[in-house]
């Protein structure tokens, strides 16, 4: 099948590459000329494990193309995926201007039947709005389908090639048949495709992300309570997770959820609720708890140093909002850096791939180290903000040699409690005894 993807961000690029891998001819459209030129020359604009090989393979096999010309791509494709940004507007609601403006162009440019597939995370009712915009421009028949994306950054290729489910919201048999054909390689291997109406499909995406944000936040509160009463959240987590109604995943406490999705989607759902005079009380609480959780270790660091962080050298391991990505959007590291700087601390940070992104925001207010051990040179404490595998089994003796104090504040519970302690470290983590 010939498919156009409009927008080559994380979702667009990964979806496009995956659909090419499944044998389709995919035309990726973006307005950013430099980015398109780069992609034509084989440059993958994002870091995502296993993406590069698949990307090159499909360019070479002439199944993956890039262009800035929407008309050219549309003329070749029956199916058009929209993978456009829906950033939070000033009031937290999703800004649909990119989606609707492309819908407008599609209406103006299309010359025969199209299925417009919305992959972007959009509020309930957006499929209807897209339909209205396109109908205002053309009499040619078309269908609008909601097909939310559930991939995780860092596992984008894995999740796209092996999704837990495919959700398709459509009231048109013609569009449903086309979507079934596209996803046949998945359904053939037993991956379910769940058809529903457009609105339910749009809400499924927000409900899934918000539920996971609540799940994590619930565990963060349990972890904080564990510290108060002397329980160990690792044990509680295992005990709870073994009940398959709860499950083991997304029960890991830490310094809050970040990234480009959970914070944005929780806010947007709260906002959508308000527009209907509906209060998502659980989501409001989740947002508040998460804001505090992100910087929860700073008060511990402050307490440790007798209330004064002025001039204290803090090493930070990890800047990305989670491991396996260079994405720093809503990363807890940034909140912690800003707060520590405000309190007069001096920071040296190390991240495998996210340093450049942080430089663009924080600049030279902090120092950047070339290796995880370089970051520790003369440090009064180490703060672990991202769970990169590289930090999992460090050389504690070398760390002790480099550091001024043997002190670790771990926002990701990287080590069994006894391990840093055996090496003489003070070790504060989340929801476990100190
Ligand atoms: C999330 C969802 O997991 C995807 O299913 C969804 O498609 C995506 O948003 C999206 O809407 O595009 P992502 O933002 O890539 O994916 O990251 P996650 O792996 O879900 O992690 C989100 C945040 O939660 C991270 O800050 C992570 O550190 C934190 N987290 C996750 C925890 O604190 N504890 C956990 O147990 C799991």
Image (cartoon, rainbow, N blue to C red):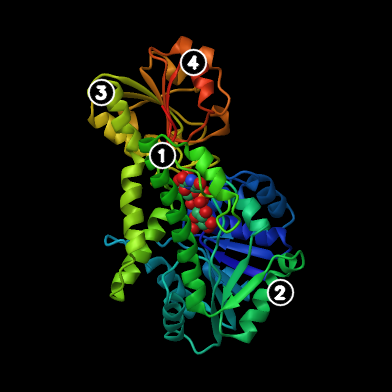
- Residue 18, quarter of the rendered image: bottom right
What residue is disc 3 on? Answer: 309
Foreground tag (2 vs 1): 1
Determine whether 425 is above or below 242 in the image: above
Q: Between tags 1 and 4, which lies in front?
A: 1
Residue visible at 57% across and 59% down?
245
Secondary structure beneath disc 4?
helix
Question: Mark 1 vs mark 3: which is more N-terminal?
Answer: 1
User: Marks 4/2: CA distance?
Assistant: 55 Å
Q: Split into 4 quadrants, where in the image is the C terminus?
A: top left
Q: Name the residue under label 1.
A: 226
Q: Residues within 10 Å of mark 3 (few under 14, many from 20)?
A: many
| Dot 3: element | loop
The 10 Å Cα crowd at callout 2, few under 14, some 14 to 19, many 20 or more, is few
Q: Nearer the viewer, mark 1 or mark 3?
A: 1
- What element does badge 2 sit on? helix
Q: Which residue lies furthest to the bottom in this view?
A: 139
In this view, 180 is above or below 393: below
Asked whether disc 4 touches disc 3, contact meaning CB atoms under 8 Å apart, the reply is: no
Quarter of image, res 76: bottom right
User: Which-is-in-front pick, marks 4 and 2?
Assistant: 4
- Determine whether, in the image, residue 8 is placed left or right of residue 162: left
Residue 399's disc number = 4
Q: Nearer the viewer, residue 152 or 295?
A: 295
The residue where tag 2 is placed is 181
Picture coordinates of residue 279, whole percent (x, y): 30, 68
CB contact under 8 Å: marks 2 and 1 = no
Can see residue 241? yes
Above/below status of 195 relative to 353:
below
Mark closest to the chain's N terminus, 1 or 4: 1
Q: Could you give the CA–CA distance between mark 3 and mark 2, rounded to whole angstroms? A: 60 Å
Upstream in sequence: badge 3 or badge 2 = 2
């Amino acid at each position: 099948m010939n498919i156009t993807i409009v927008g080559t961000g994380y979702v667009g690029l990964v979806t496009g590459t995956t659909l090419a891998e499944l044998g389709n001819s995919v035309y990726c459209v973006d307005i950013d000329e430099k980015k398109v030129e780069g992609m034509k020359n084989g440059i993958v604009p994002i870091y995502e494990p296993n993406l590069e090989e698949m990307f090159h393979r499909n360019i070479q096999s002439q199944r993956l193309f890039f262009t800035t010309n929407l008309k050219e791509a549309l003329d070749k494709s029956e199916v058009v995926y929209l993978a456009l940004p829906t950033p939070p507007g000033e009031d937290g609601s999703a800004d649909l201007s990119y989606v609707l403006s492309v819908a407008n162009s599609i209406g103006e440019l299309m010359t025969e039947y199209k299925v417009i597939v919305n992959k972007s995370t959009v509020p309930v009712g957006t499929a209807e709005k897209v339909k209205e915009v396109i109908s205002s421009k053309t009499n040619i028949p078309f269908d609008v389908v909601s097909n939310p994306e559930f991939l995780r950054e860092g596992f984008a290729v894995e999740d796209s090639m092996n999704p837990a489910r495919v959700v398709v919201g459509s009231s048109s048999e013609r569009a449903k048949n086309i979507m079934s054909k596209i996803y046949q390689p998945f359904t053939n291997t037993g991956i379910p495709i769940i058809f529903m109406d457009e609105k339910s499909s749009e809400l499924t995406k927000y409900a899934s992300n918000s539920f996971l944000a609540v799940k994590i936040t619930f565990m963060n509160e349990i972890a904080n309570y564990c510290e108060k009463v002397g329980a160990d959240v690792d044990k509680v987590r295992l005990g709870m997770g073994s009940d398959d109604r709860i499950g083991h995943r997304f029960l890991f406490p830490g310094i809050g959820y970040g990234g480009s999705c959970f914070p944005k989607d929780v806010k947007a759902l709260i906002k959508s609720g308000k527009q209907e005079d509906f209060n998502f009380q659980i989501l409001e609480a989740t947002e508040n708890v998460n804001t505090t959780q992100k910087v929860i270790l700073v008060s511990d660091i402050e307490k440790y140093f007798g209330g004064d962080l002025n001039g204290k050298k803090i090493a930070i391991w990890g800047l990305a909002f989670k491991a396996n990505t260079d994405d720093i959007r809503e990363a807890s590291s940034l909140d912690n850096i800003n707060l520590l700087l405000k309190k007069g601390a001096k920071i040296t940070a190390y991240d495998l791939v996210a340093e450049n992104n942080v430089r663009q925001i924080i600049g030279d207010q902090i120092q950047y180290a070339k290796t995880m051990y370089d970051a520790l040179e003369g440090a009064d404490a180490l703060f672990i903000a991202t769970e990169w595998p590289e930090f999992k089994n460090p050389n504690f003796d070398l760390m002790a040699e480099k550091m001024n104090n043997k002190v670790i504040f771990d926002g990701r519970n990287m080590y069994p409690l006894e391990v840093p302690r055996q090496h003489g470290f003070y070790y504060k983590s989340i929801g476990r005894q100190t």
